Image (tube, rainbow, N blue to C red):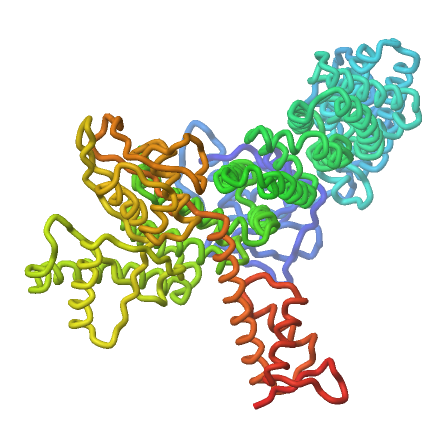
Amino acid sequence: MSLPPTKRSLSNANSNATASSSSSSSPHFHPSMKKAKSQAVACSLDPNKNGLHHHHNQDDNDVVFDPSSMALDDDSKPDDARAPAAANLSRKKATPPQPAKKLVIKLVKAKPTLPTNFEEETWAKLKSAINAIFLKQPDSCDLEKLYQAVNNLCLHKMGGSLYQRIEKECEEHISAALRSLVGQSPDLVVFLSLVEKCWQDLCDQMLMIRGIALYLDRTYVKQTPNVRSLWDMGLQLFRKHLSLASEVEHKTVTGLLRMIESERLGEAVERTLLNHLLKMFTALGIYSESFEKPFLECTSEFYAAEGMKYMQQSDVPDYLKHVEMRLHEEHERCLLYLDALTRKPLIATAERQLLERHIPAILDKGFMMLMDGHRIEDLQRMYSLFSRVNALESLRQALSSYIRRTGQGIVLDEEKDKDMVPSLLEFKASLDSIWEESFSKNEAFCNTIKDAFEHLINLRQNRPAELIAKFLDEKLRAGNKGTSEEELEGTLDKVLVLFRFIQGKDVFEAFYKKDLAKRLLLGKSASIDAEKSMISKLKTECGSQFTNKLEGMFKDIELSKEINESFKQSSQARIKLPSGIEMSVHVLTTGYWPTYPPMDVRLPHELNVYQDIFKEFYLSKYSGRRLMWQNSLGHCVLKADFPKGKKELAVSLFQTVVLMLFNDAQKLSFQDIKDSTGIEDKELRRTLQSLACGKVRVLQKLPKGRDVEDDDSFVFNEGFTAPLYRLKVNAIQMKETVEENTSTTERVFQDRQYQVDAAIVRIMKTRKVLSHTLLITELFQQLKFPIKPADLKKRIESLIDREYLERDKNNPQIYNYLA
């Protein structure tokens, strides 16, 4: 491929380079050519190698060229080589490659110079363009030429001067723009729109200027420390002159605060305007000091006033809804136009003024009302809001006070003792529901409920334990129609929760055992499985020692069934038993069952015979044992023949003895009946009252009346009629009397004395010597029932009298154990 003439090829070479030369002469060296007038740097290319080689000539400015890569002008060749070169320069005729030739070029030492007014003329163009940008006017010079102009100034080390000129020009326009806002529209929204437009114009203008002077940003600014980029320089100028125009800044901040307050009062505002202006404050770096600080102060004042007003005018549920709504609004405000860093102090300010200041008032005014009304949603809202201001401890204390105050009304009202346990269960269920759904199953609140319940259940010593046992007796007794096994099991579990809170569990055990005995002996238990389930639950709660006697009672009942079957099949029963009578005997182990007072009665001959035959059979099978008949626990079914029909009467043993007297007499006086039966006076009166004054009146009392007097007489009621064939005559002894309660409580107290004595001896046997205070402390730790220090002191004195302990001779407050 042929090349253009050498002159043209060399004219574009770099004029600022220097030529390299070599000290050894080349075999291909040729004299310099007269037309070689280049300012370029040239290197010799060796056709045999791929590297660059430099050659020295006598003149340091000589440069050797490889002809294989460049064609030569005719005048620069020797005569013998002119023809091939001419042929090589011809475009019309191609010739084969020629041998490599060398070309030497002379460099001109003169350097190019810039025009005299280069910087001023270039800046004039740029200034015109910048003015046009700020004035929003067209400019005759296109952007590419402007960019090249900046480029040229930077290349010739004029970047610093250019930067200062651009900064000065921008400052003049920015200052003028902000001064023009002074005294503008009194309408704050209109004024804010003008500020926004001014800011938006600046942003657009600085972006255009930065686009033109991009090379300045990338070279001079980067290479020079402590010099801002053109964009940052524009922001700094705007910030500087905004602070100088204090009226503009103050009016802008005031306008923003007024707009936000208007929005809080329910008015519609231009959120985009707020967004743009607050972003301007952020970009200028004055958001925190100029806006956020006064904004938080205004917010605090606004919500302080609103909180006071709404607390006086609204009830608590509505106030809490309002607070929740306000907090949500402030959160949205942060998402829409406020800086993200403002969210935390803003929400904290609102919470402090709307919630934290009013915690006591909210609890005093509405907590009890919400609890009484079981307002799950409102209580949940209260818990959620209180947790935001670390006020859950106040809420927990309010819950404790509420439980104690409400529970006292249930426990201490003696007139409502019958409803105490159902009311406590309902109250506990309500609290558990609130704890789960409103209080997020907070463990501290759960412990508060437990502590408060334990306090209120033990406000009345022994009575709640007794009533819980009675409630269980009612549920486990036959006759609870419509109650499924699952419902009964659920009720037992709920009652067990109350049982855990009882300190005097021995009182519960005594009453529960007495009621269980009646259910088992009278066959009144609704479900043996339910009874055993309850025993199992009590065993899990209190250990096997607590339920040992109760389990023994069940064993006695099962063993009695086997004994009765064996008795019926024995020879004594088949040969000696009177006809027409069926009898079933429960053999009870004395230690397992409650203690029953012996009650004498003269039984009919048939029953005496039956008892003697059974006793003979039992003692022949279990030698060395003693049988004692408990007449008060017996019950019978009598067949009665009334003129108006036959009936079967379910009655107690005492009622049976009285009724059988009327087989031989039509009318009997109270004294006659008493002499014939031998029943204790008080028990006889209750028995006659149940037969003659109750719902089923198989006897008639003369004269009529509710109470049985000494001179009353009784006759068989021949006019008795009833729709049912089998009738139950309620036995008075099945109902618990005040005396029974008292005796049960006294037995519990006696048992406690034995336990206290045993504990004192056990402790002193281990310690040998102990002070009064330490002994009392250890007793409180070991005893599982509540007891007063005065009662403990009495037991200690009793043991000293019985010579188990003695006082120290030197210090009467110290006790010694006597082995």
In the image shown, does 13 or 174 lie closer to the viewer?
174
Q: Residue at x 36, y 52 (%)?
A: 679
Quadrant including the N terminus: top left
Q: Residue at x 32, y 61 (%)?
A: 551
Residue 702: % across, % down: 38, 32
Asked which quadrant contains residue 254, the reply is top right
In the image shown, does 123 or 617 lie closer to the viewer?
617
Residue 603: % across, % down: 26, 54
Total residue callouts: 0
Q: Residue at x 73, y 17 (%)?
A: 263
Look at the picture and state if 127 lies above or below 288: above
Can residue 509 be seen here?
A: yes
Look at the picture and state if 275 lies above or below 46: above
Can residue 214 be seen here?
A: no
Asked which quadrant contains residue 256, the reply is top right
In the image shown, does 349 or 20 lie closer to the viewer?
349
Look at the picture and state if 741 lies above or below 280: below
In the image shown, does 460 or 194 lie closer to the viewer?
460
Residue 460: % across, % down: 60, 50
Quadrant including the C terminus: bottom right
Residue 743: % across, % down: 49, 57
Q: Residue at x 34, y 44 (%)?
A: 477
**Image-based side of 181 in relation to 818, left or right:** right
Asked which quadrant contains residue 128, the reply is top right
